[in-house]
Structure formats: structure tokens, C-alpha cells
Amino acid sequence: HEQAKQGLLNNKKRRKRNRRSKNMDVGATLLFRQADDDANGNPVVITDNNEYMMTTVKGIKFRYQAGNFFQNNNYVVPLMVDGVLDAAMRNVEGTGKPPSYLIDCYCGSGLFALSASNKFKLCVGIEVNEKAVEEAMENAKLNNISNCQFVAASAEAIFTSPPALTIPGFEEQKIQDFVREETVVVLDPPRKGCSGKFLEQLYDYSPQRIVYMSCGPSTQARDAKGIVEIGGYDIVSIQPYDLFPQTKHVECLMVFEKKKKGS
């Protein structure tokens, strides 16, 4: 596309200017996202980061601002979603049933919560980016999903200041009331990982299962140490996903199950 060629050209010019001004070579990354075709089946090319684009993942449409975060690589993202949902929906040993409640921390535009909506009684997402939360709520309406609620706040607030549930049929419930043996917490934090304050609250909340997707395996390993040694969980599976082939970057899914008492 001409827009892509122009972007590469502009990038080369910027690098030349940087070399002249700083006497050094400055690297850059040009990121392409695949948007859904328009109503006539024509490819959509967006070069303005303030414009909105649409991406369909496993039959669910996600509308978001081009400059906002959304998982890339339309070939691998469905596999990631499958990995998260398969882990979240495994039967709980002792009850023989899958969990009923999902809490999606760092939920962004609602990728995991909305994808899981038809498998859980209730999904609650929390995200510090207010614009992303607006997009998540609009995406729920766009897909006629009525059992998801999204909150604009830091991840810690999901435990310290839980939102009042406004979903019909659940108005009297609070997140603290969720049966722990029926609750899964999904984590998808930024590369710096989870804060110590959040992890302490997660240990206290003590859900049956933690499904942790990470774009920073080193910080995930750091957090995993605390989840196992302090939180009292076992690691039951680890699965990497290569969204950026031929680079050092990788997403990693780690699943934790609460240890049985006395084990």
C-alpha cells in the first residue's frame, strides 16, 4: 500500500536526521495491524492513530482506537484466546465442574472477558485506561453480550474498591461474594508485570485459578515465584506464543491452581 511505503520512507528520513544530530543509529519499529475489510469487502488501511478500526477474533468484533493497545498477529491471537479459555474452563478438582465467574485484570478493550462471556455466568473486567474501558463496553453492546461489566480503575481497585455490579440478576452480588472455588482471575499486565500491592490482594482473595498471560516472561517468572511460594498455588501449565517471529519478544501463558489444604 502507498501509505505503508510512505511510512517506511518517513521512518528512514527520521533515522537519518537522528544520526546527523546525535551521531548514532536509532532503531525503530513499524507496526502493521490487520483490520477487517469494509462492507464492500475492500481492505481497510488506517494511518491515523486516532481513527477507529475493527478486528474480529473468533466471531467477536472488537472496535478500538488504532493507537490503543490491542493484541497483534491475527493468526496467533485466536490461539492465545483458545489457550486462556481452555485453561479458565477446566473442571475444578473437587467439584467436577468448570468455574462460574471470571475476573479479567488489565482487560484492555475486553478481548478475554468478551471471548469468555458465553462460558461464564458473569465476567468483570478492570483496566486503568478509561478509553479502553469505553471501548470494552461498546464492544459488549456491539456483540449483544450482557453478562460482562467493565470498570475504569487500577487493577488493585478490583479488590479494595470493588464496583457495584449493575448486570441484571447480579445487582445484589459483590466480587467478594464470588465463591472462590468457582472463580478464575485472568491477568494480562504490561511488560513490567503485576505490582506487589496487587499480588498481595490477589493472595488474600485466593481464587481457585489464576490464568496469567504475559508479554514479559522475566517479570512473569518473578511474579510466579510469589504466586507459588506466598499465594499457595501450583503451576499446572506453561505455553509460549510467538506473535513476533524472528524477534526476541514472546507471549507466555502460565496457569496456576490453588493447592489443596494440607498439600
Image (cartoon, rainbow, N blue to C red):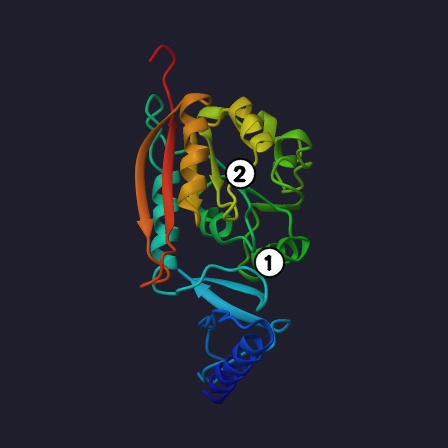
Is the residue marked by circle 1 packed among few (<14), some (14-19), or many (20+) residues within 10 Å? few
Q: Is residue 142 left or right of residue 88?
A: right
Tell which tag, 1 or 2, sits nearer the viewer: 2
- Badge 1 is on which residue? 141
x and y, in percent, of residue 243 in the image = 37, 60
Rendering quarter of residue 95: top left
**Residue at 44% in and 72% down:** 34
From where the camera sits, is residue 212 visible? no
Pick out the residue farthest to the front: 23
Rendering quarter of residue 79: bottom left
Name the mark on residue 194: 2
- Judge whether 14 appears above or below 207 on screen: below
Q: Amino acid at mark 1?
A: Lys
Q: Amino acid at mark 2?
A: Cys
**Residue at 64% in and 71% down:** 50
Q: Secondary structure at mark 1?
A: helix
From where the camera sits, is residue 207 visible? yes
Mark 1 and mark 2 lie on one chain; the one further toward the N terminus is 1
Pick the quarter of the image with the N terminus: bottom left
- Judge whether 183 appears above or below 22 on screen: above
Pick the quarter of the image with the C terminus: top left
Q: What's the distance in space between the residues labelled 1 and 2, CA to CA? A: 30 Å
x and y, in percent, of residue 5 in the image = 47, 86
Q: Secondary structure at mark 2?
A: loop
Pick out the residue farthest to the bottom: 2
Please name whichever residue, 262 or 112, is drawn nearer the observer in this view of the structure.
262
x and y, in percent, of residue 83 in the image = 34, 47
